[in-house]
Amino acid sequence: MRVRELTMKIIPLQPHYQYRLWGGDRLKRFGFCFDEVSIGEAWTASALPQGSSVVSAGSHIGTTLDDLYATHPELFGINSPVFPLLIKWIDPNDDLSIQVHPDDELAQSLEGQPYGKNECWYILDAPEGGEIIYGHTFESKETLQQALEAGDVMSGLIRKPVSRGDFLYVPAGTVHALTKDVSVLEIQQSSDTTYRLYDYGRTEPTTGRTRDLHVNQGTLASFAPHLDYMEPALSLDHFRTQLTRNPYFFVEKWTIEREESVSTDTFRLLSVVEGTLEIDGSAFDIGATLLLPAGQSFQLDGTATCLVTGVSSPTKQKARIGIDLGGTNTRIAAVSTEGRLEKQYKLKTQPHLALDTLLNQIKLAVERFQLEYDITHVGIAAPGPLDLKRGAFLTPPNLPNWHHQTIVEPLCTLLGLPVTLENDANAAALAEAKFGAGRHVDSVFYVTVSTGIGGGFVYKQNLISGAHGSAGEVGNMIIRTDGPAHPTLNVGALETHASGTALHERARTKGMTDSMTLLTDEIERSTFVEDLATGLANIIHTVDPDVIILGGGVTASAPLYWNQLQDAVAMRVYPHLRGATPLVLQQLHGDAGVIGAAFLP
């Protein structure tokens, strides 16, 4: 009797099967049963009129999910006029069309639909070397549309490798496509609106006609330039990992290996993607999707991997925006008030285009973040030299088309938010001082050894910028009397001898492939260590920091030279300072610049 009572709380759903031109019968390997041909999708949780799921057991057996939501709102615990989510199992027997989905605003204006289509994929299976299409390289909507009209869009699409267990969030606006034999569990807003951009010239067997394309609507809906979305997974406890939390839904991965207890505030949809799950005494195999009603507790057991989704809370958390503006790529991130990188968009900087192109893409990304965060500040980390008082570029070598242009004022106007500009090395220094390797001390000097060499000095978590914004620019520190000529640096400058660019050039002249290979050579390694150690010793004698943090791409080779570097620095400082100033590696790695930008004053 006890098992029966508990089981009554679980509402299992029977899928609706969808014919697709690219379908087959491969979905049967996930436990689905059907007699139709060319089935491409199993809608295991759907309230759409063109294919609603049906309750398959319990007191609500035979009820569609749409009707259940309308007649028993207490089971769901949310306030939405229609059921907001859709879960699909998709197994392509051929490549899907190149497509894009509208956001809510565009879906309402163009289609009269309540929801756009933000979605995500959990990769159930993929062939060796499997790829999906995720994004494009076209510079603008105009060039994207021209390629679509010319039938030449394939040349500009980005292919992303995938393997079993990968997870990708696909925001509305992302040009994308699944490819043959890449099977996914798709969780999305409750919408079937898709704009087909390219379809390989295929014809529908039942009509003999090619399928409609939606070039105009699709171009309007697309990110152009492409915005590449990234969101780090977040461990919630020993068996639950958050894969995404966005304005429309959240997705968690539950790994069940022993008995676990869970409770729901609002409803959950649970899909078994691997193994067998026992819940309140009933067993469910791969392919099952269950509705767990609101306000209930459940006992889970067995050995299973489950994807669990629900509706995100409408409460907005405070966050800051960090922008790491580089010569090649720009990252726009939402950073929590505790310094955690929540999520980000990355795009090509394209400094050969007008600065307005980049500013408009930043505005689009920030507006997306404002749907779920209360944004209080925007910070920009950019390569120098900069005019911090005017909020402008001076003459950064990798941004030649934007020299002497202001960026702070126009971005403030676009966003209606306070904006701060700072040198990228200074921003990384601030992040490491507040949240990274320097968070437990007062005085931090950060040195980045990458394409160039830069630095930043932070005292009691405040940047020391200097009278002209150039404090910490150690790359131009003279460490020798000789060295290669440089258009902006001194002869004998630290950067011309010890930067990644300098190492790469020496590697090239010696017929080596990269700087890491160069540093395996004892003589070259000793030369590099002596040059860098001289610069670091000068820093110690000048500002006497509690710690020096080294970051940048060249630190990837640190195991080759780290102990030797420590000894060389010790030999170059006063005896009483030897060992007093630790050299440590960065902790935030490639995220330091964008996190530090978010916390610029």
Image (spheres, rainbow, N blue to C red):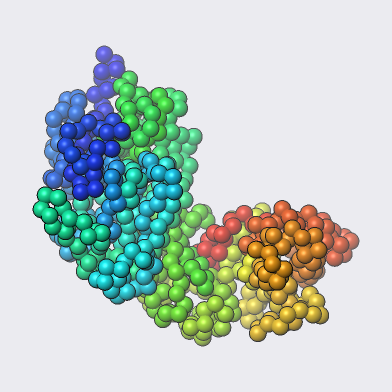
Q: Residue furthest left?
A: 207
Q: Residue at 65% of width from left, 63% of height from top?
A: 513
- Quarter of the figure with the N terminus: top left
- The image shows residue 297 at horizontal and vertical percentages of 33, 29
Q: Is residue 79 left or right of residue 419?
A: left
- The image shows residue 412 at horizontal and vertical percentages of 41, 75
Q: Residue furthest top?
A: 1
Query: In front here: 234 or 284?
Result: 284
Q: Quadrant of residue 533?
A: bottom right
Q: Is residue 503 left or right of residue 391?
A: right
Query: In front here: 156 or 353?
Result: 156
Q: Residue at 38% of width from left, 32% of height from top?
A: 274
User: Is any atom of residue 433 visible in this view?
Assistant: no
Q: Quadrant of residue 252?
A: top left
Q: Residue at 32% of width from left, 23% of height from top?
A: 283
Query: In front here: 406 or 144?
Result: 144
